[in-house]
């Protein structure tokens, strides 16, 4: 027998009446039971069909996240291969309503309030910075005050949610906002070019502004009062709770870090 040849010992005594286990054979039989059971379970597991991935529909409240989110989702597949995340960009305008209607499972939001029946958790921050022409009078200053901004046209995106616009103004002027001159453009490139042309001061996320600063004619300035940190949260329908929490952990580690947030974490 192959087993006897491998062990170099006789396992059974053979006779005309059948087989009788030798002492070595009896020890092998006594210890082989658990191993054979594990082998049988392994065989069953190998034959089972692979589980279907959990499908999660994700939307972002702010278009700035779409700059880094696709790459983050691709990187996330390595750590969460059982989650199949798709982007529902068409619901960017009102992600909370889409959650309540069941059109999406998870949303990345900044300042919108979450409706009843939904869950939420904090994720991270990004810093709102100010981009202006290097010939602008404020470019000579190391940092910008709220009073400086009140005297200049402020340039932003038409896609900025109303709740976030209100948050921004309240952060700058917590007591009472003065009359502000606002310029809105639909594309980030147009916002940046308007700032380069000296039409005003562009307010945007640092991770959006950074690539444009490689070109000449632009400078970045921060608030003199400290980093203007915009909070990001994740909201989800209760049915997507486990998937949302796993997704939150992955996105927290994969999202870009603004200088302002790095300073806060360092402190």
Image (cartoon, helix red, strand yellow):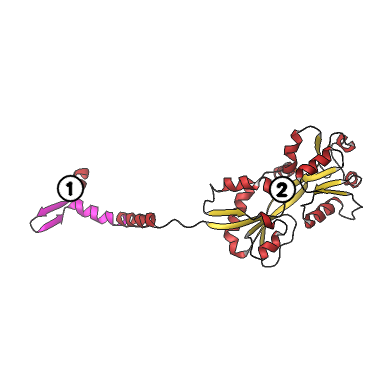
Q: Which residue is more in the foreground, 259 or 239?
A: 239
Residue drawn at x 67%, y 65% as measured from the top left? 100
Disc 1 to disc 2, C-alpha distance? 70 Å
Q: Which residues are magenta?
A: 10-34
Give above or below for 88 relative to 204. Answer: below
Graded by Cα atoms within 10 Å as few (under 14), some (14 to 19) or many (20 or more), the crowding at tag 1 reads: few
Q: Is residue 32 magenta?
A: yes
Find residue 69 and report its horizontal and vertical position in percent.
64, 48
Secondary structure under the numbered disc 1 in the rendered image: loop
Q: Which residue is more in the foreground, 9 or 125?
A: 125
- Going by the image, does 69 lie left or right of 203? left
In the drawing, what numbered circle is on residue 206? none
Q: Residue furthest bottom?
A: 117
Find residue 142 and report its horizontal and vertical position in percent.
84, 36
Graded by Cα atoms within 10 Å as few (under 14), some (14 to 19) or many (20 or more), the crowding at tag 2 reads: some
Of badges 1 and 2, the one in the foreground is 2
Quadrant the C terminus occupies:
top right
Q: Residue furthest left?
A: 16
Q: What residue is disc 2 on?
A: 64
Q: Is residue 118 visible?
A: no
Residue 261, picture quadrant: top right
Q: Is residue 30 magenta?
A: yes
Give above or below for 22 relative to 132. Answer: below
Q: Residue furthest top?
A: 216
Residue drawn at x 81%, y 33% as measured from the top left? 217
Residue drawn at x 53%, y 58% as measured from the top left? 54
- Going by the image, does 232 lie left or right of 173? left
Residue drawn at x 80%, y 44% as measured from the top left? 191
Secondary structure under the numbered disc 2 in the rendered image: helix
Q: What residue is disc 1 on?
A: 1
Q: Which residue is more in the foreground, 229 or 197?
A: 197
């Amino acid at each position: 027998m192959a087993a006897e040849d491998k062990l170099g010992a006789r396992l059974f005594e053979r006779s005309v009446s059948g087989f009788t286990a030798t002492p070595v054979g009896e020890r092998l039989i006594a210890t082989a039971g658990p191993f054979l059971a594990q082998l049988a379970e392994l065989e069953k597991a190998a034959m089972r069909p692979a589980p279907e991935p959990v499908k999660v529909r994700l939307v972002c409240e702010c278009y700035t996240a779409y700059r880094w989110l696709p790459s983050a989702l691709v990187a996330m597949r390595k750590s969460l291969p059982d989650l199949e995340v798709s982007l529902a960009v068409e619901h960017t305008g009102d992600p909370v309503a889409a959650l309540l209607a069941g059109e999406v499972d998870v949303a990345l939001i900044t300042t919108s309030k979450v409706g009843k029946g939904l869950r939420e958790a904090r994720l991270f921050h990004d810093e709102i910075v100010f981009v202006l022409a290097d010939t602008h009078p404020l470019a000579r200053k190391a940092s910008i005050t709220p009073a400086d901004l009140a005297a200049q046209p402020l340039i932003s995106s038409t896609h900025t949610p109303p709740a976030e616009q209100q948050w921004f103004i309240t952060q700058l002027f917590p007591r009472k906002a003065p009359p502000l001159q606002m310029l809105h453009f639909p594309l980030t490139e147009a916002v940046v070019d308007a700032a380069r042309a000296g039409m005003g001061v562009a307010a945007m996320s640092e991770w959006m502004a950074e690539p444009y600063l490689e070109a000449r004619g632009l400078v970045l300035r921060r608030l003199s009062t400290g980093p203007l940190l915009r909070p990001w949260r994740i909201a989800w329908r209760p049915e997507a709770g486990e998937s949302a929490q796993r997704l939150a952990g992955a996105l927290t580690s994969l999202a870009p870090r603004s200088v302002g947030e790095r300073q806060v974490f360092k402190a």
